[in-house]
Every structure is written in structure tokens, then in C-alpha cells.
Amino acid sequence: MSLNTDRLPVGKKKEVDLADAYSEPANFLEIEVRDSKTHEFGRKRFTDYEVKLNTNLPIFKKKELSVRRRYSDFEWLRNELERDSKVVVPSLPGKALNRLLPFRNDDGIFDPGFIEVRRQGLEVFINKIAGHPLAQNERSLHQFLQETVIDKNYTPGKMRPS
């Protein structure tokens, strides 16, 4: 058996237009988890994160906005997607129960290093979810990304492109 090593005919080269090379991509979805803040109310403390959305996908009503979310909000989203969607939902960064133990030499779950590692894990999680075409239709994802306050009594379902 002989192998054909002839070259395929090369057609006319397409000229590269710099306007095309630097123009906005046809479809994009960018989500950043950033600006962690720890809040203190008496003896209660919690950390939240800014979740910033920037997209031109038609399924999202708002194209640019930021909301603040706690770890428990990410847990809510994960639970909703596991219950109501056909999407394989990735795991969240761990709960870090050992960081809640007393007599530690650091600030536990409020330690800046831990908060940064968690932030990175949450960013990976939300980008995997939001990048999935089936998950983009889920109402829970839209609640999470586009509503200032999550209505946890919402009616689960699918979104339609606007």
C-alpha cells in the first residue's frame, strides 16, 4: 500500500482586514469573580464577591452588570442546576470546615489567602456553568447573574432569547 503525499491545491489567500482582527467577537461571555469583601455585623461575619458579567449573547437581557454574591449563593445555584437541568454541574471549592475550628493561628475562612483561593475556584465554577449552552437557558443562572437579590421562590424553567 502506498501513501499519497501530493499536496492539495492551494486557493487564493484571504486578505486579513485589521478591522476584523480587532473587532468584537461574534459571541462572547466573560464572567469575573472579584473584589472580595468581608462584612462584620456584631459577631456575624461573611465574605461576598463581585460577579461581573459582560456578554453579547442574546439569551441574556442585561449585557453588562455586576452583582454581589456569597458562597451560599453559589451553593444555591449549584443545587438548582442539579435539580432542574440536564447539565453535569461541576463542584464548588470546598466548604473548609477545618478552617472553622477554634484555636487556629490564622483567620480561618476569613484569611485573605483562603478567600483568594476560594474566589479563583468560584470563578472557574461560574465560567464552566455559564459557558454551557444548556445551562445558559436556565432561569436559576439568570437569577444568579442578573438579579441584585436572588428570588429563591422563583419558578424554575427555561429562558427565551430576548
Image (tube, rainbow, N blue to C red):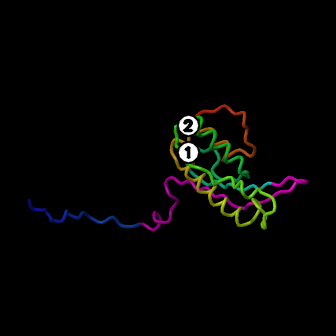
Q: Are marks 1 and 2 in contact (CB under 8 Å)?
A: yes
What's drawn in magenta, residue-wise? 17-45
Location of the C terminus by quadrant is top right
Q: Nearer the viewer, residue 2 or 139?
A: 2
Label 1 residue SS: loop
104 magenta-colored: no
Residue drawn at point x = 47 percent, y = 65 percent: 19
* Quadrant of the rendered image containing residue 158: top right
Depth order, front residue of 114/152: 114
Q: Does 43 appear in magenta?
A: yes
Q: Amino acid at mark 2?
A: Ser
Write the residue at 53% across / 50% down.
Answer: 131
Q: Give the image location of residue 109, x and y in percent.
A: 75, 59
**Who's the residue at 70% across and 63% down the image?**
114
Mark 2 = which residue? 85
Q: Residues within 10 Å of mark 1 (few under 14, many from 20)?
A: some
